[in-house]
């Protein structure tokens, strides 16, 4: 079938290999296998990096969400702090003065206290307080 | 098949790496050398297909490119008529080129070739016969 061709041209392989090619081939193959094995571990690095990035992004988004919630106005109903007991006769008003009455010497001491916070309910007046006191049966001892 | 020495070198190394990785999968129902040859021919065909797709080169131009490489190849040790033969072989379709090379240069038995290429002996004989005819016509025309 192919005798004509073989007779005219021959069937020697015309391509040659570099000198000592097969002597170095095992070493080249080993290097490629080693490189391939080390390349296999790289995806693990990228997976870890990706996870760190994602978790950081999640934290940032959570923080943004938290700060973007409108602050609830604290409508603290600050009632005048009035402490009245049977033995004591301390009347504290929700203003800058404190009326203290002692049952013995009837001395009235006025003490200054810290100014109330600005967010107190300013609708409560002194009259309201007095009215409240009068409604309740508080015993006031004089010093 | 790939003409260029560097490509052939890469493919040789890839073949042996795959042999190393898949040696446990080798079943003794075929000869070891036909199994290795099968890996080599598959890698070779994949390489040529990838080359074609990567550069969007039509079939004819891949072979023309290989023919040009042949002219500049320092590892080609043949005379002018052998160079013409190689260029004529490049005009064959890839699988037929494979059959021709294995039969003409390697003098491989059809039975072994059938194991490597997973083709019947009859089909291989027909393929080789047509390949020889085409090459003879190509050389006459040249």
Image (cartoon, helix red, strand yellow):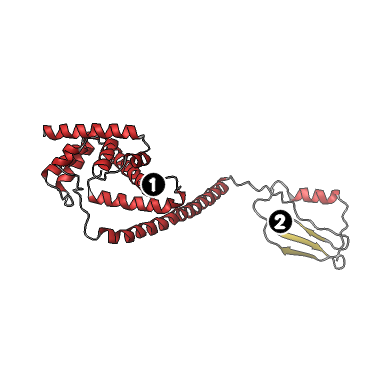
* Residue closest to the eye, B121 or A23: B121
The residue tagged with tag 2: helix, strand or loop? Answer: loop
* Residue closest to the eye, A15 or B100: B100
Q: Dot 1, how many residues are within 10 Å of its Cα: few (below 14), some (14-19), or many (20+)?
A: some
Asked whether the viewer can see residue B130, the reply is yes
Which residue was labeled with disc 2?
Answer: A95
The label shown at residue B35 is 1
Residue A64, x across and y down, in percent = 53, 48
CA gap, disc 2 and disc 1: 100 Å
* Residue closest to the eye, B119 or A127: B119
Nearer the camera: disc 2 or disc 1 = 1
Q: Is residue A63 left or right of residue A122?
A: left
Residue B49, x across and y down, in percent = 31, 39
Q: Dot 2, how many residues are within 10 Å of its Cα: few (below 14), some (14-19), or many (20+)?
A: some
Asked whether the viewer can see residue B58, the reply is no
Q: Is residue B41 left or right of residue A104?
A: left
| Circles 2 and 1 on the same chain | no
Give the quadrant of residue B111.
top left
Does residue B132 lie above or below A53 as drawn? above
Does residue B74 lie above or below A88 as drawn? above
Residue B32, x across and y down, in percent = 39, 49
Residue B43, x across and y down, in percent = 34, 45
Residue at (18%, 52%) from the top-left corner?
B75
Does residue B89 lie above or below A101 as drawn? above
Query: Dot 1 falls on which chain?
Result: B
Give the quadrant of residue A102.
bottom right
């Amino acid at each position: 079938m192919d005798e004509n061709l073989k007779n005219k041209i021959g069937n020697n392989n015309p391509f040659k290999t570099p000198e000592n090619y097969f002597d170095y081939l095992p070493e080249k193959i080993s290097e490629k296998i080693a490189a391939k094995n080390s390349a296999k571990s790289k995806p693990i690095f990228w997976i870890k990096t990706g996870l760190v990035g994602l978790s950081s992004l999640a934290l940032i988004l959570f923080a943004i969400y938290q700060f973007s919630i409108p602050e609830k106005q604290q409508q603290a109903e600050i009632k005048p702090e009035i402490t009245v007991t049977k033995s004591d006769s301390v009347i504290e008003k929700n203003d800058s003065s404190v009326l203290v009455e002692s049952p013995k010497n009837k001395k009235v001491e006025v003490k200054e206290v810290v100014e109330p916070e600005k967010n107190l309910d300013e609708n409560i007046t002194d009259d309201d307080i007095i009215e409240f006191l009068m409604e309740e049966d508080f015993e006031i001892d004089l010093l | 098949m790939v003409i260029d020495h560097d490509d052939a070198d890469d493919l040789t190394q890839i073949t042996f790496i795959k042999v190393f990785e898949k040696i446990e999968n080798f079943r003794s129902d075929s000869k070891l050398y036909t199994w290795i040859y099968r890996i080599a021919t598959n890698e070779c065909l994949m390489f040529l297909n990838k080359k074609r797709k990567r550069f969007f080169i039509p079939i004819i131009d891949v072979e023309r490119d290989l023919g040009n490489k042949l002219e500049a190849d320092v590892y080609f040790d043949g005379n002018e008529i052998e160079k013409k033969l190689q260029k004529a072989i490049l005009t064959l379709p890839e699988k037929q080129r494979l059959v021709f090379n294995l039969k003409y240069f390697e003098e491989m038995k059809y039975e072994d070739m059938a194991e490597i290429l997973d083709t019947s002996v009859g089909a291989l004989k027909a393929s080789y016969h047509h390949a020889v005819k085409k090459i003879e016509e190509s050389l006459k025309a040249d």
